[in-house]
Amino acid sequence: MAEAQVIDFDTKQFIIFRLGEERFGIDSLKITTIDRMKTITRVPKTPEFIKGVINLRGDIIPVMDLRAKFNLPPVEETEETRIIILKLEEISIGVIVDQVLQTIQLSGEDIENTSSLINSAAAEYISGIGKVGGEIVTLINFEKLVKL
Amino acid sequence: MDMSQYLQIFIEEANEHVQNLNQCLLQMEKDPEDKDVLNEIFRVAHTIKGMAGTMGYTKMTKLTHDMENVLHAIRNDEIKVTSELVDVLFKCLDALENYVNSVVSTGGEGDREYKDVIATLNAILQNKGAAAAPAVNKAPAPAAAEASEKYVTALVDLDEFEQNAVNKAIDMGMNALKITIVLNKGCLLKSARAFILFQTLERYGEIIKSQPVVQDIEDEKFDFEFTVVVVSKEDEQHFSKELNSIAEVDEVIIRPMGRFNNGVAMEAEKLEKAETEVRSADSAESHAVKETETQEAAKQNGNNAARKTQRTVRVDIDRLDVLMNLVGELIITKTRLEGTDITEKPQEYHETLEYLERITTNLNDAVMKVRMVPIETVFNRFPRMIRDIAKDLGKEIELVMSGEETELDRTVIDEIGDPLIHLLRNSCDHGLESTEKRKQLGKPEHGKINLTAYQSGNNVIIEVGDDGAGINIDKIKAKAIENGIVTREAANSMSQQEAIELLFRPSFSTAEKITGLSGRGVGLDVVKTKIEQLGGTVEVETASGRGSKFLIKLPLTLAIYQALLVNVGSEKYAIPLGSIYQIYEWKAEDVKSVQGQEVILLRNMVVPITRLADSLEVPDSHTKTQNKLKIVIVRKGEKLTGLVVDSVIGQQEIVIKSLGKLLTGIKYLAGATILGDGNVALIIDVNSIT
């Protein structure tokens, strides 16, 4: 082999999305698909951050409103609003985000552990802070987030 | 050793054999002299032993081995079949079943050894008299006699590449061996056994060639023998010892090979060489690749083995073919639709659409059929159960089953077992009189329990009947009054049917249990709840002195049913049509209130009503301000309830889908369905609405 390809196992790909002014990241391996906003059927007797369910190619998928979960004020949906469908272990769930921005590669040293840095409602669901160039993205631990 | 890829096969087959054993033992109990049944039992026990041995389940092997010893002694007329003996065999069966269940849930056979059962088996053998002592070890080895025969696969031919490999190995001071392995004729899971042998071989050497090729061996495309050429540091004796220690191997013939010289073997092989065919050089390589692939696959399976084995349905291949054809049709029609212009050829377009509709309907039926399982799978454990109960109670009971071939949806099959067990027990315990009493009454001594299943329209009916004393209505009423469920006056004015309904009250059954009063009612509420969850109903027929009969009515399938779509506010909900009684338009001012509960007076019946908008927290409903209310009257068990909706959309066939793990157990909802426009509508669980 002429060119040996170096695979860095520490590097993970993250999808960066926006919620208000803040940027968040999620491990791309957990994402099934990213979809445009579609009609959400409200399900009664569920917590407020469960927006309802959607039909994703014949499967019924619950959809979570991240803004509500993080105590952010609600906004009108726009052309940019997306539903990210995640597969976490055996549960599929959609999360509504304001905009999907890009994918980035983060290696171990780009990620900083945080416990004391943040004091928002989101704090306990954060698995780390990623540094991309000069910017900062918050990496979310969705497994924890989904545990209702 | 990694056997996980055979685990599923093992479980399926073991279950079948255990079931078979069950039936045979019941047969044996009825007719202890029947040699055919005995032989069948022997065969099954032997088969299970072989399978368990292959999979490395030593405890199971041990148990079946001891069972075999006893069976063998019976076969040789050394032991008589007695009811105690059958009891012991049943215990063995239970033990085997537990082993299999343990395999299903954990992948291993578990720790229990059933020493008591094994001890009893051995005790039976000891007692049969000294004459029959050597009943041990009849693992059949008749094939050994024919060992000297030439085996076809021994005529293995090596191509140049392989010969070089052999030569090289010999040059390096290693041994090249041609090993022909003959498996026992009774060997099950031949490929699994071969897999073990291959693993053993690979532990000590390298396989250069196998005849037939590995792929064929894996697919069981071989008789009972195969030949491999191995190069190894170990010698002949070592291999002989290792290979012969593996179970179900009848014979191992090992021959050392010499150097090849221009395609001709120097030694022993010369004769055989003459009649060989040439193989392509890459076959060795490709099969080496195969080998690594299978091993990797095996490893992956191993990782998965920790997780529980999946639930499966066995499907008739014809049904799959139908499905295939329909999907083919679907694709053709889709292509036709694409090619048809709706404005130019509207006629053709609509024809195609109609055709499409027909196909989807058929497809629906076909998929449903795939999910259908004969109720036999539930029924066939009952004879044994009834036998045990009868023994416990000291009654003579005959179970007559019919309609085992009736098919039900898989989901129903999984759930229906417990309620049926409940009803059968009930019939045995409370329904049938004791043998003495039956004699006094001039009835046949053995009580009869009928278990019948049949299809009726879109429903399946299961009947559990007995020819016992029937339900004592007065006793029920007395009990109900005593427990304060009804007043004396109410009880006196009750019809027979209403009184029987009392049996299904939860509180009623508990009281019965505690006092141990004979009569029906233990846990019948559980039965009723379960059946209703499955969308079915339970009815009771009884005649004093002649017995009683429970009728369970179940929908053919749970996955697809007719539903009424309604609007509540701007949201759409589906109500199962089966539970709808009537739809009314009601003047808002005619709704009365009784103790805070809204009711309507429907033909002199007081029917409570529920505003769905309130129950379901729908924000934008107008029912509060409307002066005419749309009320869907539904049956909730025997009672009626009115559901107030904004408007009725119409009837539609819906496919029920689960809301998923995250949203399980939401009150009032039975699931969700996808509407024609792709949106989701929720299905209302009529039984839980208040």
Image (tube, coloured by chain):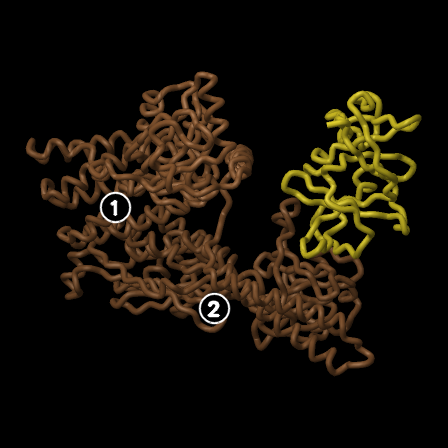
Chain colours: A yellow, B brown
Dot label at residue B426: none
Name the quadrant of the N terminus of chain B.
top left
Farthest residue to the bottom: give it.
B347
Can residue B336 be seen? yes
Residue B394 percent across, percent down from the top left: 20, 50
Image x and y of residue B292, in percent? 54, 33
Which three-letter amino acid code belongs to the residue tagged 1?
Arg
The quadrant in which the C terminus of chain B is found is bottom right
Location of mark 2 (residue)? B459
Q: Residues within 10 Å of mark 1 (few under 14, many from 20)?
A: some
Q: Nearer the viewer, residue A111 or A93?
A: A111
For the residue carrying disc 2, how many other residues have a C-alpha within 10 Å: few (<14), some (14-19), or many (20+)?
Answer: some
Say whether residue A26 is left or right of residue B236: right
Depth check, front residue: A137 or A48: A137
Q: Residue at x 81, y 34 (%)?
A: A25
Q: Is residue B596 above or below residue B245?
A: below
Residue B43 circle label: 1
Question: What is the chain identity of the residue bearing mark 1?
Answer: B
Specify whether residue B634 is in view.
no
Q: Are marks 2 and 1 in contact (CB under 8 Å)?
A: no
Q: Quadrant of residue A138?
A: top right
Please name the residue shown 93% across and 26% down the image.
Answer: A134
Q: Is disc 1 on the same chain as disc 2? A: yes
Mark 1 or mark 2, which is nearer the start of the sequence?
1
